[in-house]
């Protein structure tokens, strides 16, 4: 289709002022739209939103400058790898946002403005739909429980008995030994009964005399996805 063709000519590698202006305009507009959609139902910082808004433009300029130069392309790839290792690990949603911003910048930098607009609108609509429907929604009764107990504590018998009266499901997903405290850290994924409150669950666990108890509604972020 005509709208998905590149604005660059295959016979001429020179970039005109009109072409670079179109690239800048579309990149900034799509970056702002992408950042606005990311903010919907997300915990974000001002710096990250600004980064998402401007990243497509920066990448588009880099791609336009490379413009078929193999040596420059290799140098740019090396630069991106350095940025990757200097960046802190983020959540899955942040990674998706960065990848989409890069895809927008690549499309506009190569002159495929129609494709960049189409891709941004479709992906933004998909993100809004997934955020609204219950497809990826976490069960509101699911909890993540961290319990620190002494080494000689018989946790199997106690927690099986207590969780059986307050939880529909309780899974021990990890067991960690803490050498300094001579203690075990038990990590549970539990599904509460609708009549059981968080306070009641904590009181039940505290009756065993653990060294420490941490209850979260969501599982803490891992280094892997």
Image (cartoon, rainbow, N blue to C red):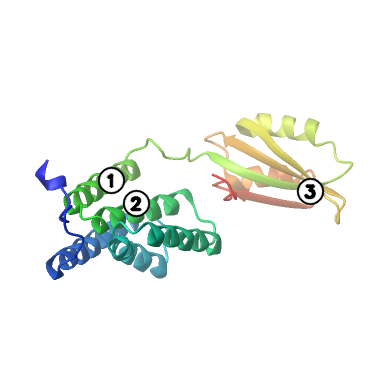
Q: Is residue 112 above or below residue 205?
A: below
Q: Residue 92 appears at what percent x and percent y?
A: 47, 48
Is residue 40 visible in this depiction of the protein?
no
Q: Is residue 157 shown left or right of residue 214?
A: right
Label 2 environment density (alpha carbons within 10 Å; few <14, some 14–19, many ≥20): many
Question: Which residue is identified by label 1?
Answer: 123
State which quadrant residue 104 falls in.
bottom left
Q: Is residue 27 shown left or right of residue 205?
A: left
Q: Is residue 153 above or below residue 98?
A: above
Tell me whether the residue at label 1 lies in contact with that at label 2, contact meaning CB atoms closer than 8 angstroms. yes
Task: Looking at the picture, tell me which residue is in the foreground, 164 or 126.
Answer: 126
Question: Which residue is identified by label 3?
Answer: 210
Q: CA distance from mark 3 to mark 2?
A: 46 Å
Q: Which mark is residue 100?
A: 2
Tell me whether the residue at label 1 lies in contact with that at label 3, contact meaning CB atoms closer than 8 angstroms. no
For label 1, the SS is helix
Q: Is residue 12 shown left or right of residue 65?
A: left
Q: Nearer the viewer, mark 3 or mark 2?
A: 2
């Amino acid at each position: 289709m005509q709208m998905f063709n590149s604005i660059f000519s295959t016979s001429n590698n020179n970039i005109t002022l009109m072409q670079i202006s179109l690239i800048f305009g579309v990149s900034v507009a799509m970056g702002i739209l992408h950042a606005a959609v990311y903010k919907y139902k997300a915990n974000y910082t001002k710096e990250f939103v600004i980064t998402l808004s401007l990243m497509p433009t920066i990448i588009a300029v880099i791609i336009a400058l490379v413009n078929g130069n193999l040596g420059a392309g290799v140098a740019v790839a090396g630069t991106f790898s350095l940025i990757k290792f200097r960046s802190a690990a983020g959540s899955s949603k942040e990674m998706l946002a960065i990848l989409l911003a890069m895809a927008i910048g690549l499309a506009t930098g190569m002159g495929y403005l129609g494709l960049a607009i189409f891709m941004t609108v479709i992906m933004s609509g998909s993100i809004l739909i997934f955020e609204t429907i219950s497809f990826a929604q976490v069960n509101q009764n699911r909890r993540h429980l961290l319990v620190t107990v002494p080494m000689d504590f018989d946790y199997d018998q106690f927690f099986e008995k207590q969780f059986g009266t307050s939880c529909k499901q309780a899974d021990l997903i990890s067991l960690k030994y803490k050498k300094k405290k001579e203690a075990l850290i038990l990590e549970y994924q539990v599904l509460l009964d609708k009549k059981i409150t968080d306070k009641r669950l904590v009181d039940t666990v505290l009756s065993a005399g653990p060294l420490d108890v941490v209850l979260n509604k969501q599982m803490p972020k891992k280094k892997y996805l």
